Image: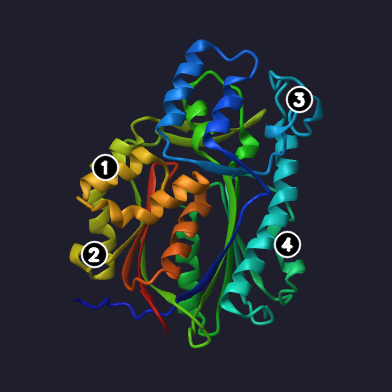
Amino acid sequence: MQESNNKQKAYLLGIGTAVPDYSYSQDYALEFNLGIEGTTERQKKFMRRIYAGSAIEKRYSVIADYDRDPADYCFFPPARSLKPEPTTEKRNDLFIQEANRLSLRAAEDLFKRIGNSNTDDITHLITVSCTGFSAPGFDFHLARELTLPPATRRYHIGFMGCYAALTAMSLAHSICKAEPDARVLMVNVELCSVHFQQRDDLDTMVANAIFADGASAALIVSDPTAANGPIIAFDSFNSQILPDSKEDMAWRVGNTGFTMKLSAYVPRIINENLDDILEGILKKSGRSRGDIDIWAVHPGGKAILEKIEEALQLDPEELRVSYEVLRNYGNMSSVTIMFVLQRILADSREGNVLAIAFGPGLTVETGFMRKTARP
């Protein structure tokens, strides 16, 4: 096996996760949507098909209203029509509140998993989200609640979508390669459900059927000797914009939340460009397709996983973790790949890992890594 030309100087020591207090089965979510006053028969027919074929069983949401009587709603107006829809301001206020809470829970879970709650040596904090904004943001809240050193450098990666976790890891990789003592805390929070909207377009109905809420935290360091369990060593990262795909996935700010453009052609576009995507990251890492032992694929949806499985001629077992995360959590935007990597970090496998995530643009981020039992 050919070794990478770049000496590995960044290591992922652990991943913590958190989800909201409220969860709903996909069957329940479908019935809730079918019962919204004003839903047309055309919408109902489409929703039944989308929910039945989603491969999702359960999702989490910060919205408590879904199993309440309309008179007791606290986010939606007290009407079965859910009209008038909450404003973008109200949605963002909920994001701020819950992002602060869930980001801290994810970080606490991380430190519990790695057996070290010391934050005195954190040098950098990278936060990631595309589902809400504030200044100061949840990075500031985390810095205070975790008592991070006052000189901790903070960076926020915003509005990049589902691939942003790999963008953040690439940034952490660069930091660690440049600073021998770097210890980078990376925290993702995505609360997609706060943008649930009643629209007649198919893109919005698909988004309502697959997206969900969650948070993750990871510790990335230059020196892995303090690790007490399996680690992932970063090798190289690559970014690629797919041709003629700008309008097939987009995320914009609207008056009643953020609006999603999610073309049905996305799985096909990814499928058609997989050879180029793999060539880019393998060339950068100095590896070949045969060097990949473990696949960490962002489960953006069932159709996407199936197209990747088909195009790469993968055994279904090779994407088992991605299907499991999709089934139990849905698509949590940038957080989702971190749930996949957490499970890969915890299982018994060792070897080279290829991580793939994609989002608006259409942009595909890839990372070549190596998982080992000990440093």
Q: Which residue is mark 1?
A: 271
| Residues at discs 3 and 2 in contact (Cβ within 8 Å) | no
Residue closest to the eye, 80 or 132: 80
Q: Nearer the viewer, residue 115 or 133?
A: 115
Q: From mark 4 to mark 3, how far is it between C-alphas?
A: 35 Å
User: Where does label 2 land, which residue?
Assistant: 283
Disc 4 versus disc 1: nearer the observer: 1
Q: Amino acid at mark 1?
A: Asn
4 or 1: tag closer to the N-terminus: 4
Q: Is residue 180 above or below residue 266?
A: below
Residue type at tag 3: Pro
Q: SS of the residue at dot 1?
A: helix
Residue position marked by numbered label 3 in the rendering: 70
**Residue occupying image coordinates x 35% and y 54%:** 320
Where's residue 42, x and y in %? Answer: 48, 13
4 or 3: tag closer to the N-terminus: 3
Mark nearer the N terminus (2 vs 4):
4
Which of pointers 2 and 1 indicates the residue nearer the eye? 1
What secondary structure is marked by label 2? Answer: helix
Mark 3–mark 2 distance (CA, rounded to whole Å):
56 Å
Q: CA distance from mark 4 to mark 1?
A: 40 Å
* Quadrant holding the N terminus: bottom left
Choose the circle earlier in sequence order: 1 or 3: 3
Crowding around mark 4 (Cα neighbors within 10 Å: few <14, some 14 to 19, many 20+) is some
Q: CA distance from mark 2 to mark 4?
A: 38 Å
